[in-house]
Structures are given as structure tokens and as C-alpha cells.
Image (cartoon, rainbow, N blue to C red):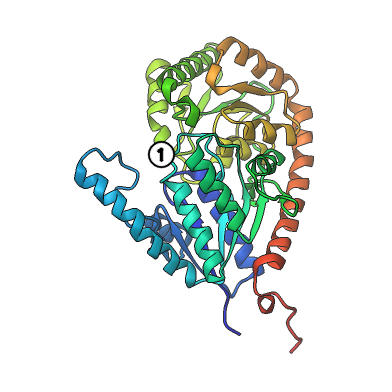
Amino acid sequence: MTAVRVGLFGLLGSGNLGNDGSLEAVLGYLRSAHPEAVVDALCGGPEAVTTRFGIPATRLHWNRAEYRTASRAGAIASKGLGKLVDVFRTAAWVRRHDVVIVPGMGVLEATLPLRPWGFPYSLFLLCASGRLLGTRVALVSVGAAEIRDRPTRALVRWSARLAAYRSYRDTQSRDAMRAMGVDTARDEVYPDLAFSLPAPPASAPAGTPGPVCVGVMDFHGGNDDRARAEEIHRRYLDGTIRFVGALVEEGRPVRLLTGDTCDAPVVAAILDAVDSPLVTAAETASLADLMKEMAAADTVVAVRYHNLICALKTGTPALAVSYAAKSDALMERMGLGAFCHPAREVDADRLLEQFRALEKRSTELRRTLAERNLAAARQLEDQFTALTSAVFPAADHAPREAS
């Protein structure tokens, strides 16, 4: 029997820990359910993916300067040529596979600044190639949000329509795709893929107040906030600095966490503004590293979606500084819907009130999180079973005859 050929697609290996965590989760599923599968990736950071996960990987874009701003005529021409070349590169890569999986990530949303001819165009090329060449493309536990920008909206809508399998990480994502004209009658909702990753046991010290993990982000608003991006960033940063400073005044150790390499300037700004040995920054290279930090904390306050997932997965009470509806939906699903604060309007005093209310309910919420995590793990087992049935060749998962 010929081994099934599986491709993994996305902005993987590019410095975003959440994206790589989704990849890790799907690789775990493949190695368990389809151990004979031949796996490779088309991704943003092929060298990092190969080094960390041990699979062959190809660069997503022909133009190496794809994500740099092009102002000179030569650079603009190179980008245009790259878009044409990527049509053929993507199709050639897709053709070599039986199945292509897009593992989680917010691939159907524009809650952060996004140009239509960047990743939305790449995703459309993937899904169109899959439909034309007979390769099944699966969008697995992905995030979605209704998009106003017409070119981006059109590319995202057609990508979803052309995929052979779709599932979403929350109900709001499915509703958004339905609102954008996609038939979602057969699409299911499952937890984010990161909930299938192993978590370390909680190790927060008992008795005296312990450390607080504060996850930060280089936040400038979303696609519709470009005109006031700097104002939003300044308000977010000032509020976060005031919040961290207040915790330090109470003698609380604060551990700063990131979720992407682009968040480093925010960490530096906080360390510069709050000059105290109680404030330290963690070096994290994976969701496992984040979970280890959070398992040792009393409480987590975080912006990035997968920072929140790591906190909830370890059973650590968390307060979401929400930049999109997906964070609110996640918190509601895990029983912490009352503990959300808008990232665009960070009010340090109000954030402190919510933080103290959260800590008062810590014991109760840890029990709730333990129950919700068990339910999430069971749902993801169902998700992987459904994925196997939907997109893998029948011979690959047919029962083996006893020898």
C-alpha cells in the first residue's frame, strides 16, 4: 500500500508560537493515527519547521521579501512577479499530496492588519489548486471573522468554499463564514487544536500571593483601525505599564510573556518603564514553554489568543485583554466569560478590579477549568476521528487484517 502523502500549510515557523503549536498538535495526530504518512510543509519559515519538527519544508513565497514594504519600482515588480510564480509553485506542491491540512490559526479572519495579496491570496491559491488537482484541502479548527475589505473578503470566502473539509474553533467563526456566504451546514465546531497538547502539572506556590504572568503583544488594532493604530498602541502600552506597576507596588512578582517575535519591543518598553527586580521577561520558544511559565503562576493576564489558551490549558485562572471576539468566545467557553477587558481601551484601574475579582475566585475557577479541559480533549479526539474519515484515503485508515 502506498503511503498517504500529507502536506501542512500556513505561516508556520515564522515566530508565532500559536501557529507552531497548532502544527505540533496536528503532527501528534498524524503520528498516532497515520504513522505511515509522508509529511512535509509549505510554510513561512521552512528552516525553523524542519529544525524543530523534523519534516521537510518549502518556502511559502517565491519572493523572499514578501512581507517587506515595497517602495522602489524593482521591489514592486518583484512582488508582482512573485504572485505569478506562486500560482505555479503552489499548484506543483499541492499536486504531490493526497491531503493538505491547514492546522488551526486564524486563517479566515482579519482581526490584525492584513493585506489581501498576502496570506489570503496564498490560501486561495492552495484551496483552488486542491479543487482543480483533486487534492483534499482541510481547514481544521480554524478561526474566522467577518471581513469588510472586499478583496480580502472575496479571497477568504472562496478559499473556504473550495476546501474539502472545514471546522472552526468557535461558533462565532462558523457564524462569520455563514454571514460571508459560505454554506456551513456540515461544518462542525471544535476547541482550538492547542487543547490537545500535553500540559505540565500546576505548580503555583500555596499561601502567600505568588507570581503573575502578563502576556503582552505588539498591538496596533486590526484591519479597520489603521488610521488610529498608533493611538491604540499607545493606550494599550500605557495601560499595561500602569497595571504592571501597580502589581509591583503590591510586591507581586511579574513575569512578562510574548507569543511572537514581534512582541519584543513591548517587553522592552515595560521593563524600561517599570524599573524593578520584580519584573522579569521569560524566553519562550514554544507553547510548552509558555505553559510551563503559566503553570507556576497564581494568575495570568494576557492578550494573545494562544497565551490565553496556554493559561486555561494549565488550569491557571486568566484575565483576557481581548483584541477580538475570538478571545471573548474562548473565555466564555471555558467558564471565565466575566473576565475580559478590551485591548483597545485598556483602563489600568478597571483591569486591577477585574484582576482582584479573578483572584478571589481562584479555587473555584481552577475546578471549572479542570472540567472544561477534559471536555475539550474529548472533543478534539472526535475532531481527529472525523478528519480521518472525511479526507484520508479509505485504504489508509481501513482496519488491518490480523496476521
Label 1 secondary element:
helix
Residue sitting nearer the eye, 348 or 149 = 149
Residue sitting nearer the eye, 228 or 51 = 228
**In the image, what residue type sits under mark 1?**
Thr
Task: Tell me the quarter of the picture where residue 342 sits.
Answer: top right
Q: Residue at x 51, y 38 (%)?
A: 150
Asked whether residue 222 is in view, the answer is no
Q: Find residue 118 and report its horizontal and vertical position in percent.
A: 41, 46
Q: Quadrant of the N terminus?
A: bottom right
Crowdedness near tag 1: few (<14), some (14–19) or many (≥20) residues, C-alpha within 10 Å: some
Q: Find residue 233 and report its horizontal and vertical position in percent.
A: 44, 21
Q: On the image, numbered disc 1 is attached to which residue?
A: 261
Task: Tell me the quarter of the picture where residue 394 sits.
Answer: bottom right
Q: Residue at x 71, y 56 (%)?
A: 383
- 285 relative to 394, above or below: above
- The residue furthest bottom is 403
Q: How many marks?
A: 1
